[in-house]
Image (spheres, grey):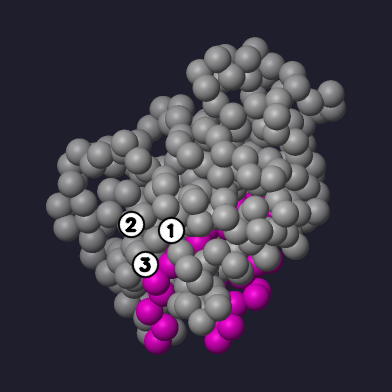
Amino acid sequence: MKLFEQIAEAVDFITSKSSLKPEVGVILGSGLGEFAESLEDKTIIPYESIPHFKQVSVKGHAGRLVIGRIGGRPAAVMQGRYHYYEGHDIDEVVFPVRVLCRLGIKSLLLTNASGGINRLLEPGDLMIIRDHINMMGINPLMGPNDDRLGPRFPDMSTVYDPQLSDKIAAAMQAQGLGVKRGVYLALTGPSYETPAEINMLSVWGADAVGMSTVPEAITARHMNVAVAGISCVCNLAAGISKTPLSHKEVTETADRVKEPFKKLLTTVLPIF
């Protein structure tokens, strides 16, 4: 079965479970999935029940699609994602994004947990992604292009929509959160970076580093959906941190910021 038909099959299944037509999509990163519980009129669909979706294997990713309302606005929220490092093909990694776009969302908010490279960032900071650097060694648009999904050579001059990012910044300011913006760099993982690698990434202009988000952003822009990103800085990167890096630290920091994070999304998404 070709990609377009697989997407259509997944969309048909989801629409058979919920009559809501989502206008905004959200992908929740490591430890940030609790926000989905706050949706109203929600329908919860496990990933493994959706045609062509995969199971997640990383702690902190529930692996459920939640369709509901936030502030009255229909939304499709992914509780967790699967990653390239889990052994999935890159087209499998971004398949859920394609499904969200075909469901009819107009904007997509991507969130993740990251390591802070910029020394002005501290664990617990929420950084608005203003641009990204793709160092995963792969692009989700490689291979034959289906013009029904998007153009062969999509422009990436403004991946992260400035107007959406400004709405996030205004909500952060009103909430008393420090407004920080930066460049997110994606590597494949799953090993954390070495101090020498972090030094190199800093020279390249990266403010934070992680193992996701970039393929999803490229895919959504390919399908002409507006994108914004929030990166939760969960630890300081190697060579900056004085302690060994661990996924436990990531989930603990995400848990610590979950309340301001939920409040931020509850404020932003109805006007996204």
Q: What residue type is labelled 1?
A: Leu
Q: Nearer the viewer, residue 115 or 166?
A: 166
For the record, the magenta segment spans 19-47
Q: Where is residue 47 in the image (x, y as percent from the top left)?
A: 51, 67
How far is the residue under mark 1 from the one under mark 3?
Answer: 7 Å
Image vertical order of residue 68 relative to residue 79, above or below: below
Q: Can residue 62 be seen in this view?
A: no
Is the C-beta separation of discs 3 and 2 under 8 Å? yes
Q: Residue 105 carries which label?
A: 3
Badge 3 marks a residue whose secondary structure is: loop
Is the C-beta separation of discs 1 and 3 under 8 Å? yes
Packing grade of label 1 (10 A; few <14, some 14-19, many >=20) is many
How far is the residue under mark 2 from the one under mark 1?
Answer: 7 Å
Q: Nearer the viewer, residue 206 or 101?
A: 206
Badge 1 marks a residue whose secondary structure is: strand
Packing grade of label 2 (10 A; few <14, some 14-19, many >=20) is many
> Which residue is the site of mark 2?
225
In magenta segment, residue 23: yes
Q: In which quadrant is the N terminus drawn?
A: bottom left
Is the C-beta separation of discs 2 and 1 under 8 Å? yes
> Which residue is the site of mark 1?
108
Q: Which of 120 and 77 is in front in this view?
A: 120
